[in-house]
Amino acid sequence: MIFVSLSIPASWIWIYCEAMYPPRIGLFGIGLDAYWPQFPGLKDQLERQLQAVCERLTRPGIEVFNLGLVDTPAKALEAGHRLRREDVDLVMLYVTTYALSSTVLPVVQRARVPVIILNLAPAPAIDYPSFNRLNDRTAMTGEWLAFCSACPVPEIANVFKRAGISFHQVTGVLGDDPQCWNEIDAWIEATRVMAALFHNRLGLMGHYYGGMLDIYSDVTQLCATFGGHAEIIEVDELSQLRREITDLQIRKRLAEFQENFEIQPDCDPAELERAARTSLALDRLVDRHDLSSLAYFYSGTGNQENEDTITSIILGNSLLTARGIPVAGEYEIKNACAMKILDCFGAGGTFTEYYAMDFAADVILMGHDGPGHIAFSEGKT
């Protein structure tokens, strides 16, 4: 189970994926090449609208590839190949005017990624008085076509459905339409999460907590669903890394503990030193295996060194979680993945469980003696 916070400092958010493999969005508009010689200015107008969409989609940490207007089957085929080459995570199809579905299908078939149909009108309504004053049938038809974004959407949906292509449609206005653009923004954030999970390296250290049948996970299904990699790690390795930690490093980590935790007067200094040594070893373990999340549990029964390691792990794991490397105890793989997802959304989650019910205050007491997300706590933990 995870507890979610939506108001935490942004400094801890994990940015490895964006730095190494930034999410990529492919954008293209559609049209019909037969229109351009008939209606002067129409293509230029639609290209300006497409550029406006591109600018709205562009933001830090996201790469947008604008393929321009696709208006023939030949261009559609080339656009599909380019999207494959650019390794995009999501395709945004901006419907500018009527276009043949044969200019759309090859693009998304080749890309093989989720598709969002942007059914965005250039304005809330046609300016009918101005339209009627044009007094030129060609000019009126060209202006009409500029507002015909909804026209091919059923045709495209029909073809996608029959071709087995999953898609989602966003309908609204190109300009001032917060509800519409909030929905588009949500898809972009979902793409950010999807890309992060595909590159997520999940460390699995130890074994399941015996008897907790609900937490047992199929790691193959995890990788098949989200991508990523599961790295099996021995507790012995963490114990070995603890031996290499120096007294000077421990003193520095103890100072960091004082900055991040409220140390109670009855806390044994020897216990803090044990936790500091393990925390430093954990940092090395994460760096060595390039981990971006971790699930663990171990008893260390019969091995004093491993027991010493595993019983001093909580403060170090809490610091890792605050850095955007979420750690879940009890070998709770699903929890670690859920925490990673929330990290990527800029929200954050912590490993927790239900405790008691307070009916008088109408609250549920929650918590855990394992690692917590100290970055979104009110005050020091």
Image (cartoon, grey):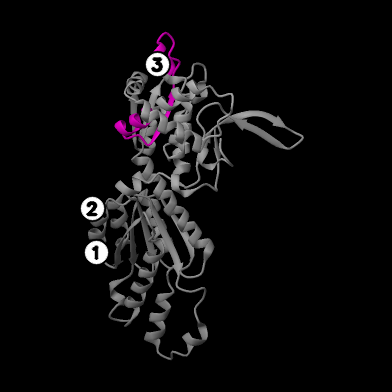
> Residue 377 sits in which quadrant?
top right
Reading the chain from its start, which is encountered first: label 3 or label 1?
1
Q: Quadrant of the C terminus?
A: top right
Q: Position of residue 171 (x, y in %)?
A: 48, 63
Q: Residue at x 38, y 64 (%)?
A: 94
Is-magenta flag for residue 303? yes
Question: Does the image show residue 100?
Answer: no
What residue span does the magenta drawing correspond to?
281-308
**Tag 1: amino acid:** Lys
**Tag 3: amino acid:** Asn
> Residue 241 sits in which quadrant?
top left
> Between tags 3 and 1, which lies in front?
3
Q: Is residue 203 left or right of residue 263?
A: left
Near mark 3 (Cα within 10 A), the count class, few <14, some 14-19 or many ≥20, is: some
Residue with the most extreme top position:
302
What residue would you read off at disc 3? 306
Q: Quadrant of the N terminus?
A: top right
What residue would you read off at disc 2? 85
